[in-house]
């Protein structure tokens, strides 16, 4: 099964490798919305997100020969989008890593988990988090990366990723409860 | 994973709230893409360094073997020809002397009429012609060993003929002498 998933859209990918514009457009159509949303969650600004998506597709198609089905095309592309977003945020000097707050110790006791809240509340709750917390929540909860992958993307240790994620989540729960 | 995390992961799709401006983005993407290659991807073998090396080796080997064949052949035929010629010279110098000596003896012989001498010598002329033919044959370099053998046989035949003739002459002389004695 797993190998079948890896070869999703294989024929389109192979045709795109040869520079077939139609195949490239079909792949673009399939993935553009998902990639745009990934970028929007990171960048928040429409123009910035669009720039990232455009650059990511151009880079992906121009370097498609280096794609060897080690992951799905979608996750390969998403990683490009994420990396480009992080680079853009760095350029804008927006903190991508959660601020270390040594003074504030979180009690690791059971959290007060709200009953099934409206997803829209969670989305706006994430937007209210400090930007460093937003990235880690997005990467872990929404994009589905594990802490090792996040440590690679953000250039931090996986233990930092873990501890910061727990802080971010606690903060998010607090915010969501007030909404 | 707690319920909160589970809840979010299960509803991931709901986080995709934005719609991209497809056409606008594609226009910008298309202008940044590499020019499409020809559909059938041509692999230019002659551009790879390995191919260049292989081609050089093949050409060098080809030239070498060509030169080798030409030169060695030349040397071989030369040495073969010169060998055959040397052997012919040896044969000639050995047998020519013998034949000349015996022809002289025949000519000197007083017991033979000029007719008989002529007839005998015409045989010798025939054998001479054969000898010339064999000599030409030797130049053609067909099978020099066999040709040389034939030349030797040719010489031997002449000598044999002359010897026979001389023997007959001698024996008739003896007979004559005997007759004289008996008389």
Image: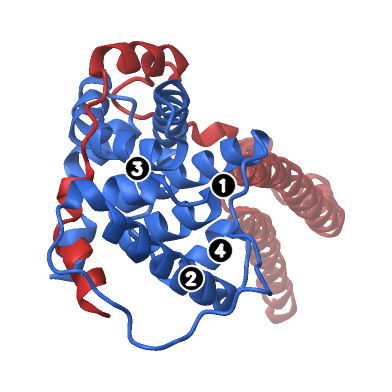
State the separation of the CA atoms marked 2 and 3: 22 Å
Name the chain letter of the residue that bears numbered label 2: A
Q: Pointer 2 and pointer 3: residues touching (CB < 8 Å)?
A: no
Q: Nearer the N terminus, badge 2 or badge 3?
A: 3
Q: Which chain is red?
A: B
The residue sitting at 56% across, 63% down in the picture is A152
Q: Relative to A89, is A126 above or below?
A: below
Name the chain letter of the residue that bears numbered label 4: A
**In the image, B151: left or right of A145?**
right
The residue sitting at 67% across, 45% down in the picture is B53
Q: Are both tags, 4 and 1, on one chain? A: no
Q: Residue A159 location, x and y as percent? A: 56, 79
State the separation of the CA atoms marked 3 and 1: 90 Å
Near-viewer residue (B7 or A106): A106
Question: Which residue, given by chain and number where applicable, does mark 1 sit on?
Answer: B142
Question: Which residue, given by chain and number where applicable, does mark 3 sit on?
Answer: A38
Q: Nearer the N terminus, badge 3 or badge 4?
A: 3
Q: Relative to B26, is A150 above or below?
A: below
Near-viewer residue (B41 or A4): A4
Question: Which residue, given by chain and number where applicable, does mark 4 sit on?
Answer: A152
State the separation of the CA atoms marked 2 and 4: 20 Å
- Disc marking residue A167: 2
Nearer to us: label 2 or label 1: 2
Q: Are both tags, 3 and 4, on one chain? A: yes
State the separation of the CA atoms marked 2 and 1: 103 Å
State the separation of the CA atoms marked 3 and 4: 18 Å
């Amino acid at each position: 099964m797993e190998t079948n998933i890896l070869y999703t859209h294989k024929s389109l990918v192979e045709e795109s490798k040869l520079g077939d514009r139609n195949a490239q457009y079909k792949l673009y159509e399939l993935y553009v919305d998902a990639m745009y949303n990934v970028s929007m969650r990171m960048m928040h600004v429409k123009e910035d997100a669009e720039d990232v998506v455009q650059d990511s597709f151009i880079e992906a198609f121009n370097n498609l020969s280096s794609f060897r089905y080690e992951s799905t095309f979608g996750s390969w592309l998403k990683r490009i989008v994420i990396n480009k977003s992080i680079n853009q945020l760095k350029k804008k000097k927006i903190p991508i890593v959660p601020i270390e707050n040594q003074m504030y110790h979180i009690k690791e006791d059971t959290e007060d988990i709200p009953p099934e809240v409206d997803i829209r509340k969670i989305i706006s709750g994430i937007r209210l988090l400090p930007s460093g917390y937003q990235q880690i929540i997005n990467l872990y909860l929404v994009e589905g990366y594990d802490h090792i992958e996040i440590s690679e993307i953000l250039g931090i240790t996986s233990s930092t990723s873990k501890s910061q994620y727990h802080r971010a989540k606690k903060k998010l729960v607090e915010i969501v409860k007030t909404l | 994973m707690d319920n909160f995390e589970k809840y979010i992961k299960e509803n991931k799709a709901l986080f995709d709230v934005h719609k991209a401006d497809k056409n606008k983005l594609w226009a910008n993407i298309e202008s940044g893409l590499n020019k499409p290659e020809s559909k059938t991807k041509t692999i230019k073998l002659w551009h790879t360094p390995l191919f260049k090396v292989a081609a050089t080796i093949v050409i060098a080997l080809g030239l070498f073997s060509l030169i080798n064949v030409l030169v060695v052949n030349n040397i071989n035929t030369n040495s073969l020809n010169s060998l055959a010629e040397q052997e012919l010279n040896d044969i000639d110098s050995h047998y020519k002397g013998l034949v000349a000596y015996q022809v002289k003896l025949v000519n000197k012989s007083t017991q033979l009429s000029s007719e008989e001498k002529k007839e005998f010598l015409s045989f010798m002329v025939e054998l001479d012609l054969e000898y010339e033919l064999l000599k030409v044959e030797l130049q053609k370099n067909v099978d020099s060993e066999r040709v040389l053998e034939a030349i030797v046989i040719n010489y031997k035949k002449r000598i044999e003929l002359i010897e026979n003739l001389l023997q007959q002459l001698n024996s008739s002389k003896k007979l004559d002498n005997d007759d004289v004695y008996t008389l």
